[in-house]
Amino acid sequence: MRDNEKATEIEVITSGDPAYPARLKEIKDYPRQLYFRGGIGMLKKRCVAVVGSRTTTTYGRNTARAIAARLASRGVTVISGMAAGIDACAHEGALNAGGETAAVLGCGPDICYPKQNRPLMSRLETQGLLLSEYEPGTPPEYWRFPQRNRIISGLSEVTVVVQARGRSGALITAELAAEQGREVFAVPGNIDSQYNLGTNKLIQEGAAPLIRVDDILDALGLNGRDEKAMLTELTPLEQQVWQVIRDRGEMGLEEICMVLDDRPQRISPVLSVMEIKGFLHSASGKFFLANR
Amino acid sequence: MLIRMSTAAIAGVEGYPVTVETDISRGMPEFAIVGLGDATIRESVKRIRPAIRNSGYIFPVERLTVNLMPAARPKEGSHFDLPIAVSIILLMEEWEAPEKTAFLGELSLDGRINPVRGVLPMVIGLRRAGMRDIILPRENAEEASFVKDVRIRGASTLEEVIAYVEGARSLPVYRGSKSGKPAAEQLDYVQVIGQESVKRAMVIGAAGRHGMLLMGSPGCGKTMMARRLPTILPSMNDEEQMEVTAIYSVAGLLSREHPIVDQRPFRSPHHSITLTGMIGGGAKPRPGEVSLAHRGVLFLDEMGEFDMRTIDSLRQPVEEGCVRINRNLTELVFPSQVMVVVASNPCKCGNLWDPRRVCTCSQRQLESHRRRLAGPFSDRIDMHIRMMPVDRELLEQRAEDRKGLTSAQMRSQVEGARAIQRSRYAREPYSFNSGLDESGLERYCALDRECTAMLSAAYEKMNLSMRGFHRIIRVARTIADLDGQEQIGTCHIAEALSYRTVETEDRN
Ligand SMILES: [Zn+2]
């Protein structure tokens, strides 16, 4: 099962590393180290998990692709588990839209599981990100997958379960997300199909039903509006600030001044105004794009 | 036979004239000092007798009574040795007391004169009382030479003093050296690299004398920032230097190397400091750290580590600009016009804001840390400054020729804004924007419709309190002054908002 041809180097980051995703560190049992291949930087952006069962219907697969594509086109990183079925479709949807997507594996980052995802995995290596808390060579074991799911939900502000049967691992991800205080959406399905039993049950238990794809963007504050349209509301300097923060995910005042090569007395009023207008929010001395 | 001699005593940081009345009469040999002297003064009996004998004079075997007038005020200090000894010798040699001449100094058993504390305020008090010549320990002459219109004569032995009084020799008037002092380590904000936004905050804080909280992870440079604050404050004029030197004189902190405090003080007491150490007082009242920082900066590093009662006790002195200590029905006043800067980690372990480290605090520890920053004293803190560690990578990408602001550049901005405040508040009890009370805010900080709209929007979005409101307007006033604008504008309000209190932050 070991994959010998290395497309990209396997790297490792620890929780002390600046590149380590801050959101993941908020969960109580976050992994102390992550092995990865690809662009780790995408985890600093807004992240949404799109997950579901291995066995699916066309409806499920199409929905997964549509959701992932929409999110990716708005600059949101799509997180999933590279399993067969919904997970694979989510990655594909994001990649096809030219967006960013990360797969969290339940085995070493050099192991392709399931085997049929080999082409997808090579795409993820070069265009996306492969991520695992297990060191290279760790074989896939059924008990590792629920463990892995906490990372999927932990990396994400929102978890969307697209389609799940009664006993899908995706339901565990949803449960973990709720425990981690993250928002959970479930895509409702027709009630005569057992493929939708798990997602419908999630809704019954309190998950938000996903009525239209843009519900997720609303939850993220991206409001379903186009970035371009939004930017026209901003002054040129506000636009610059907004873009700088979007590109880097989170920034302190000093860093913004340095990147824009401008004086703090010009930048800090702009930040306050943007915060009041709801474009930004600040915490811990840093500025983030706001949940609009 | 009776003789009267002039000297001085100290109440708080004020010197006042004291007359030493000495009487020799027949009777059982006795040597008594009356007039509310403390133990040091009563002990002077034991120093004066050998000092007189060892200087070659006769000590009377008669009944000696010394009265320190005004007798009702408590007095302390060893500087009464010299006037008492001189009185006794002059009585024995049947000389008159010199006119308009005062004496102070402590005696060694061999007749040498030792330096004492509190000389400057005593000399000020004696000049006010019309003295022309003041004889004092040579080591204290530099400090005393600060006072104009009075002749300071330094002496090292009792014998020298008697020879001078009897006209056998002269004691030259000390002119003061004031020069050739080694320059202290030259601190300058230009040495702080990659923290221009914090330097901007320091300019605002210094301009309006706002209380500041520097918050950031350990090692992000909070102390470095605070330590350089005096370099951007306007330098002290003579009167201010004299005030501050008087306090240090009373506290016994002047030395031959540093006889005068001519730089704005920077005091950074350790968090183990007692309440008395901070505020002043004690059995023999001494100025506390808040008074030693008078006209300068009081820096409390790691505010969370201090005893909260000690911190809260600072509120009144910082607000009123002085410490009042009641003692034996009299009130002592120590000045305490300070700029307060406190530093704190964002949490107990310090790592909360550091992207490279893990915060190990429990939820309860985080809450208690936040509560500590919101105590009664927090009212005196107008600005919260969030500090991040310097981003080396970004710094290296920056063009070489980009130089940061120097202390001199920053100071000229501060001076400009302070001049505006000085003339605006000429008739007010306060002289800085940080002193603006509610009616002052109304009078001097009228807001136009746009500013009001911005503030009410901020009220909702940023979870401000009413007090937070006032703080922001005060800071906005200072930013407008730095900008040379009489009318506060939205950009000033917006910049002030970035220094709002950390605990109101939206935590999600
Ligand atoms: Zn901590």
Image (spheres, coloured by chain):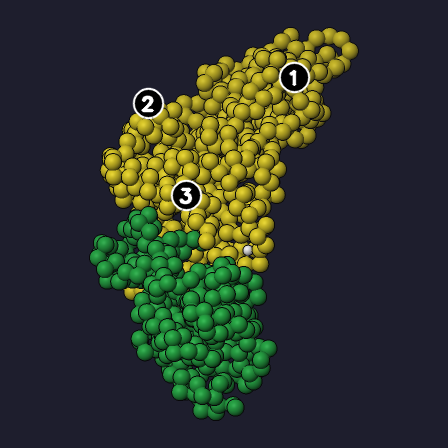
Question: x and y percent of residue B455 in the render?
Answer: 32, 40
Q: Is residue B220 above or below residue B157?
A: below
Give the residue at x 27% y 42%: B490
Please state which amino acid type lies under the numbered disc 2.
Answer: Arg
| Residue B432 figure quarter | top left
Chain A's colour is green
Q: Is residue B18 above or below residue A215?
A: above
Give the residue at x 55% y 50%: B366
Give the residue at x 38% y 51%: B198
Helix, strand or loop at disc 3? loop
Chain rendered yellow: B
- Answer yes or no: do the residues labelled 2 and 3 have beta carbons within 8 Å? no
User: What residue is disc 2 on?
Assistant: B427
User: What residue is disc 1 on?
Assistant: B36
Helix, strand or loop at disc 2? loop
Q: Is residue B196 visible?
A: no
